[in-house]
Image (tube, rainbow, N blue to C red):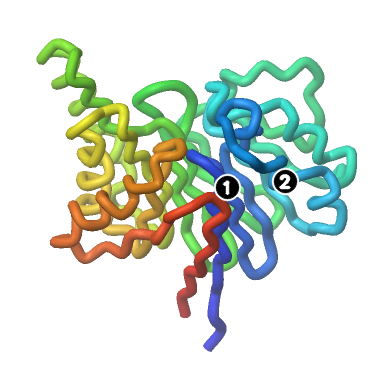
């Protein structure tokens, strides 16, 4: 029986590199070094992609902590890179390898299948089937329960989030990248916990916590009563492996 593997690298915030048996996926990359005080250079450079095959770069929306135009520099080293971009991202010159998407679309590019879903902020979320593994990247789809919002706004955020998850709750997801944002204070875990108990992914990967690396551990403890594995992210460039038979 063949084993399908995904090597996952947490780059920063909501940005991940995922290498499956035959494909390489990048999610929501941005040059974090220019936004945060981090003693490091860029992790992904054009040279990194020069000899890579089957590369797919996903951008969920245009917020600067999810999208950086420097990603298009990578195709100078590898013109075969496919870019899957939410339609709120402004592209001056469209190319055949630029795939502009809206929510609720399904299509294939070469040997991967992609479906888009909505967000409770801007842009889209992605469901991807690749090399026998199903991956969900939420983008900014989250239960944004801000303490200072009105009760009516909080109730609407909850309703919108839960209705969007209703659209994917029948999907069997292996790896889910889900926001757990500490700016929400004590409400940081609400979206992640609801996602875990509703969707039950085999591996839930916390994201959107900036440099607050205590959050994944805190979140893991918070949902320890659920039968969902939480990825052990404790630092930048943390690597871990997911595999399924």
User: Considering only vertical position in the picture, is 21 above or below 220?
Assistant: below
- Quadrant of residue 160 in the image? top left
- Decide if residue 168 is on the left or right side of residue 25: left
Spot occupied by residue 47 in the image (x, y as percentages of width and height)? 85, 49
User: Badge 1 is on which residue?
Assistant: 11
Residue depicted at x 59% and y 26%: 35
Q: Secondary structure at mark 1?
A: strand
Spot occupied by residue 244 in the image (x, y as percentages of width and height)? 46, 75
Spot occupied by residue 3 in the image (x, y as percentages of width and height)? 54, 80
- Decide if residue 41 is on the left or right side of residue 108: right
Residue depicted at x 26% and y 50%: 219
User: Considering only vertical position in the picture, is 153 above or below 163?
Assistant: above
Q: Nearer the viewer, residue 193 or 42?
A: 42
- Quadrant of residue 174 in the image? bottom left
User: Badge 2 is on which residue?
Assistant: 44
Q: Secondary structure at mark 2?
A: loop
- Decide if residue 116 is on the left or right side of residue 179: right
Q: In whole angstroms, how far apart are the C-alphas of marks 1 and 2?
A: 9 Å
- Decide if residue 141 is on the left or right side of residue 10: left
Residue depicted at x 37% and y 44%: 178
User: Considering only vertical position in the picture, is 73 above or below 172?
Assistant: above
Q: Nearer the viewer, residue 23 or 145?
A: 145
Q: Are marks 1 and 2 in contact (CB under 8 Å)?
A: yes
**What's the mark number on residue 215?**
none
Residue depicted at x 53% and y 68%: 132
Neighbourhood count class around disc 1 (C-alpha, 10 Å): few under 14, some 14–19, many 20 upward: many
- Quadrant of residue 121 in the image? top left
Residue farthest bottom in this picture: 1
């Amino acid at each position: 029986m063949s084993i399908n593997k995904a090597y996952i690298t947490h780059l920063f915030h909501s940005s991940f590199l995922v290498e499956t048996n035959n494909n390489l996926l990048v999610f929501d990359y941005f040059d974090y070094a220019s936004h945060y005080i981090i003693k490091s250079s860029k992790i992904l450079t054009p040279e990194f992609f020069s000899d890579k095959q089957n590369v797919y770069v996903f951008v969920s929306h245009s917020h600067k902590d999810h999208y950086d135009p420097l990603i298009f520099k990578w195709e100078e080293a590898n013109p075969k890179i496919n870019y899957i971009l939410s339609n709120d991202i402004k592209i001056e010159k469209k190319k055949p390898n630029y795939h502009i998407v809206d929510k609720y679309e399904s299509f294939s590019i070469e040997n991967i299948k992609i479906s888009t879903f909505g967000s409770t902020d801007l842009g889209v979320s992605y469901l991807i089937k690749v090399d026998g593994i199903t991956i969900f990247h939420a983008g900014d789809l989250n239960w944004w329960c801000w303490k200072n919002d009105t009760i009516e706004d909080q109730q609407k955020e909850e309703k919108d989030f839960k209705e969007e998850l209703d659209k994917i709750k029948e999907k069997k997801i292996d790896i889910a990248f889900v926001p757990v944002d500490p700016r929400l204070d004590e409400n940081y875990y609400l979206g992640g916990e609801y996602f875990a108990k509703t969707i039950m992914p085999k591996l839930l990967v916390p994201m959107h916590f900036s440099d607050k690396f205590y959050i994944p551990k805190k979140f893991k403890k918070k949902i320890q009563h659920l039968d969902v594995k939480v990825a052990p992210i404790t630092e930048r460039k943390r690597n871990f492996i997911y595999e399924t038979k």
